[in-house]
């Protein structure tokens, strides 16, 4: 055979793997060498990088040898390289036969078997992670009991954390064994046992090293980001300076000792370890270039090309490892919210986000993705950022993630309870954070806060909103508030009484609500929302002062006193608003007569029939109102007396009545007039400030929402307003015996509602807090039909069922996590986000999220927008 001459040396690349994860490496090789490819299939995307190719089984040394020998014999100078995990042993064996430089075949085999690696470390006298092989569930349980729970169970020959699971008890161990034993990947090989290992607590690192003549040089250290336990899905990696870390010297020593123990003498390797309180502990030693685009991110941050380094080592040369820059780089992988088929992956252009250098789709329309443990790395996209430090990369990735969207088609029930978490929540539950740091003291179990929550238990952490979440809520809720205020003028010619009757108010309620109507209602609202997989959806929007949820500020103030949480909040730039302070700013502005009063007597006032139930959370905020300059008392409307037209409580003149009672609570009877008219008389005479007038309740009711949702009224809305309604408001209609449009089709409303109760909820227009609500999916058919027919023509609406997503909270065992569906009570004051009262339940199909149904209550912190610095710490 004649020998070809070429200006560039030949690299024989065995296996190229997946384009999205390895094209950067192949492109680097092609820029410096003549690349020939050996793979099981003919080149496709690889074609523009390779000079020629051969087709062979790259995992079988006997089948691989002829192709390598042929390509080697064509040129004077050649080297063999692989970054394919499954081809490593075969490549090492073939290289040894042909005199090519590669890893020692025996070492390559050890790297391919996690149990063999453990044995090699033990033989070298290294303090290894305790472990044992298991060929059955019973053997696995016995091994775990000998090692001590928790343990990690993993397949011996796979990679990418596939089939790996942590088990904390015998039941979990059996589940983990079945997962590991059943996990298979084509070409990866199998073993007759799985590995049970000690669970090492601490942050996880990966180290890519060069090895020349047995000399190991750690080059790239990446901090691994892991997904939710009990699995070990790698959701991202951070590359940043590490040489000055307190663990750096011990990590380097462990990496070098491990390579000597296994016998690795040449190549580029990928070591995985955890930094425990007792020092670093080896998890795996892989004989190939790191995956997950880690070397690519490292090159963007430092300029060092590890793919080229691998080729140089194969040519028996010492690679140049001189960094040309000292930046931080980070990659974050995105996932669908639930199993299904990819419809579309929407990603920002890097030019839209400072620091974002790449946004790459990893899935195409039609791809089936299944979340762990059912699927292997079911990623929809990768985002890569580079910055001066990790704070910059995190900020860029958080922003880019907020602009990204993975649209998935799946069974509708998959959307119910699908876990949707933002980046802050994921970091709160990082594997490296202990269970003790995944909860916040100060509210949960404290009797005063239980009282303020109406007897409910407090959530063990706040919920977290991103800056984009807050901006979106401000945009949509302010827009909806303004739109609701315009409904009387647009649809009723400005006739407020006609509007009141249309939303379901009785004659008595309309009479009293219209007394003292003002030109501009207070800019206060509270939205009750669920987060669905594609964004927030509104259940109801309350306006005026009878909002509730104002406890949120007091909860937040208690949580931030927890030192551990305060440190996390500072690192994440988390803040919280003070809702009562903002509300009282509006109150003082709309009640100018209070300006000359030192400490106005403020009566927080409810309707007599509901007072005992609401008294607890009314009293809970009394200290806050005192701090804000008021002398507050808590009472109901029947507690007032009137002297010379003034409102008197317990012998003292009331300066301002903070109204919490609602028109829907006022029965159509004389007693209602007797209770309300004297107060309205005093307000009209300037004897008391009423905060706020009853007419603001005209707008905050579900009947108004039905009017906006009704297709017959869409012509009265602008294009932007229609888009707003479609974005945030679920389909809502008055219960009438008529035809309506549902999802673009004309239907007979009542027959449809009877036949589709699981998709609908029946709600009274004027009541709040879940009172009178009938979720169809929790109601038997007979009761549903009865309630439906009773509601026809009355003050009731039907609304499309919302499918709330979940996020993690610490379980009662204090060790594991549980998913809870969260209802968001988001307050808007003066057009600005003013906090969120969160309620969480473990059953997303509960129907009504309330303390009576097991809901726990808490607050929200949000990421401060650097532009405005809003919020308190």
Image (cartoon, grey):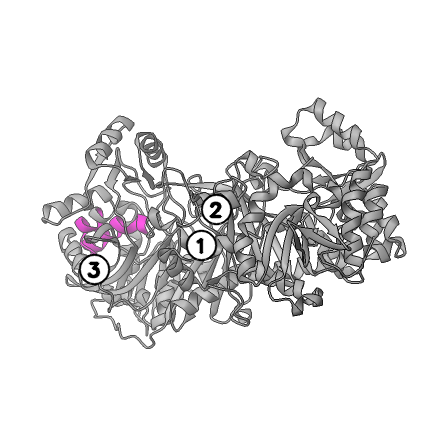
Q: Specify the segment rendered in magenta.
A: 85-109
Task: Give me the C-alpha separation between circle 2 and circle 3.
Answer: 46 Å
Residue at the far top: name it: 782
Crowding near the residue tagged with mark 2, few <14, some 14–19, many ≥20 C-alpha atoms within 10 Å:
many
How many marks are shown on the rendered structure? 3
Magenta stretch, main secondary structure class: helix
The answer to which of 794 and 34 lies nearer the viewer is 794
Give the percent coordinates (x, y) of residue 588. 66, 65
Task: Give me the C-alpha separation between circle 3 and circle 1.
Answer: 40 Å
Residue designated by label 2: 449
Give the percent coordinates (x, y) of residue 551. 54, 51
Q: Secondary structure at mark 1?
A: helix
Q: Is residue 837 visible?
A: yes
Crowding near the residue tagged with mark 1, few <14, some 14–19, many ≥20 C-alpha atoms within 10 Å:
some
Q: What residue is rendered at 80% in x and 50% in y? A: 513
- Residue 689, image quadrant: bottom right
Taking the image as shown, residue 335 lies to the left or right of residue 714, namely left
Give the percent coordinates (x, y) of residue 52. 39, 61
Residue 94 among magenta residues: yes
Taking the image as shown, residue 110 lies to the left or right of residue 12, namely left
Q: What residue is rendered at 12% in x and 50% in y? A: 126
Q: Secondary structure at mark 3?
A: helix
Residue 681 among magenta residues: no
Q: Which mark identifies residue 558?
A: 1
Among numbered discs 3 and 1, the one appearing first in the sequence: 3
Q: Secondary structure at mark 2?
A: helix
Residue designated by label 3: 251
């Amino acid at each position: 055979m004649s020998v070809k001459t070429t200006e560039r040396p030949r690299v024989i690349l065995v296996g190229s793997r997946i384009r999205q994860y390895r094209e950067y490496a192949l492109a680097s090789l092609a820029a410096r060498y003549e690349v020939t490819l050996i793979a099981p299939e003919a080149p496709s995307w690889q074609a523009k990088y390779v000079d020629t190719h051969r087709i062979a089984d790259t995992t079988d040394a006997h089948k691989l040898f002829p192709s390598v020998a042929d390509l080697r014999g064509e040129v004077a100078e050649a080297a063999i390289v692989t970054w394919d995990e499954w081809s490593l042993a075969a490549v090492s064996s073939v290289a040894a036969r042909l005199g090519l430089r590669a890893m020692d075949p025996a070492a390559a085999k050890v790297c391919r078997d996690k149990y063999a690696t453990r044995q090699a470390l033990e033989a070298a006298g290294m303090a290894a992670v305790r472990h044992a092989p298991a060929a059955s569930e019973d053997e696995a349980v016995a091994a775990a009991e000998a090692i001590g729970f928790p343990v990690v169970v993993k397949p011996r020959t796979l990679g990418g954390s596939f089939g790996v699971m942590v088990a904390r008890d015998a039941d979990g161990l059996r589940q983990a064994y079945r997962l590991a034993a059943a996990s298979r990947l084509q070409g990866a090989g199998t073993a007759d046992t799985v590995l049970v290992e000690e669970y090492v607590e601490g942050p996880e690192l990966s180290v890519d090293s060069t090895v020349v003549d047995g000399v190991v040089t750690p080059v790239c250290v990446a901090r691994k980001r892991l997904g939710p336990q009990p699995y070990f899905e790698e959701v991202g990696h951070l590359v940043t300076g590490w040489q000055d870390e307190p663990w750096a010297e011990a990590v380097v020593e462990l990496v070098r000792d491990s390579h000597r123990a296994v016998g690795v003498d040449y190549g580029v390797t990928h070591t995985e370890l955890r930094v425990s309180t007792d020092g670093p502990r080896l998890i795996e030693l892989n004989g190939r270039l790191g995956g997950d685009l880690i070397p690519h991110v490292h090159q963007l941050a430092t300029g060092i090309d590890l793919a080229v380094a691998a080729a140089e080592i194969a040519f028996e040369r010492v690679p140049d490892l001189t960094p040309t820059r000292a930046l931080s780089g980070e990659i974050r992988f995105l996932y669908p919210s639930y199993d299904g088929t990819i419809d579309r992956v929407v990603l920002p252009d890097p030019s839209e986000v400072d620091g974002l250098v790449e946004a790459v789709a990893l899935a195409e329309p039609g791809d089936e993705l299944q979340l762990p443990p059912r699927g292997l790395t079911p990623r929809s996209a990768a985002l890569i950022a580079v910055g001066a430090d990790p704070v910059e990369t995190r900020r860029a990735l958080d922003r880019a993630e907020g602009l990204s969207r993975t649209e998935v088609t799946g069974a509708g029930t998959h959307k119910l309870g699908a876990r949707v978490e933002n980046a802050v929540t994921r970091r709160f539950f990082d594997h490296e954070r202990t269970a003790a740091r995944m909860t916040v003291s100060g509210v949960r179990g404290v009797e005063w806060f239980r009282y303020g929550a109406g007897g409910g238990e407090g959530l063990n952490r706040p919920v977290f909103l991103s800056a984009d979440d807050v901006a979106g809520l401000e945009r949509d809720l302010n827009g909806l508030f303004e739109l609701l205020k315009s409904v009387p003028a647009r649809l009723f010619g400005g006739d407020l009484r006609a509007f009141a009757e249309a939303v379901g108010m009785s004659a008595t309620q309309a009479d009293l609500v219209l007394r003292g109507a003002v030109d501009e209602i207070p800019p206060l609202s509270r939205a009750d929302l669920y987060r669905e997989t594609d964004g927030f959806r509104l259940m109801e929007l309350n306006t005026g002062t009878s909002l509730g949820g104002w406890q949120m500020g007091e909860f937040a103030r208690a949580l931030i006193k927890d030192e551990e949480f305060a440190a996390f909040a500072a690192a994440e730039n988390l803040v919280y608003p003070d809702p009562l302070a903002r509300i009282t700013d509006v109150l003082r502005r709309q009640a100018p007569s209070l300006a000359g009063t030192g400490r106005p007597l403020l009566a927080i006032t409810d309707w007599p029939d509901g007072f005992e139930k609401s008294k607890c959370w009314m009293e809970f905020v009394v200290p806050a109102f005192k701090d804000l300059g008021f002398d507050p008392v808590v009472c109901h409307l029947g507690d007032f007396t009137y002297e010379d037209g003034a409102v008197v409580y317990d012998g003292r003149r009331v300066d301002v009545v903070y109204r919490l009672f609602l028109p829907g609570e006022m029965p159509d009877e004389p007693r209602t007039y007797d209770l309300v008219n004297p107060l309205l008389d005093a307000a009209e005479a300037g004897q008391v400030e009423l905060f706020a007038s009853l007419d603001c309740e005209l707008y905050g009711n579900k009947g108004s929402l039905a009017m906006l949702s009704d297709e017959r009224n869409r012509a009265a809305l602008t294009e932007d307003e229609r888009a707003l309604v479609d974005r945030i408001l679920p389909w809502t209609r008055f219960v009438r015996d008529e035809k309506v449009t549902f999802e673009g089709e004309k239907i007979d409303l009542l027959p449809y509602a009877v036949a589709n109760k699981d998709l609908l909820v029946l709600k009274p227009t004027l009541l709040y807090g879940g009172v009178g609500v009938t979720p169809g999916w929790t109601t038997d058919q007979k009761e549903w039909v009865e309630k439906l027919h009773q509601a026809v023509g009355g003050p009731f609406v039907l609304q499309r069922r919302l499918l709330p997503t979940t996020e993690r909270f610490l379980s009662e065992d204090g060790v594991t996590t549980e998913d809870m569906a969260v209802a968001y009570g988001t307050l808007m004051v003066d057009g600005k986000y003013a906090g969120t009262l969160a309620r969480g339940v473990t059953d997303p199909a509960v129907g009504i999220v309330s303390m009576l149904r097991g809901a726990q209550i808490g607050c929200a912190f949000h990421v401060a927008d650097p532009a405005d610095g809003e919020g308190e710490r």
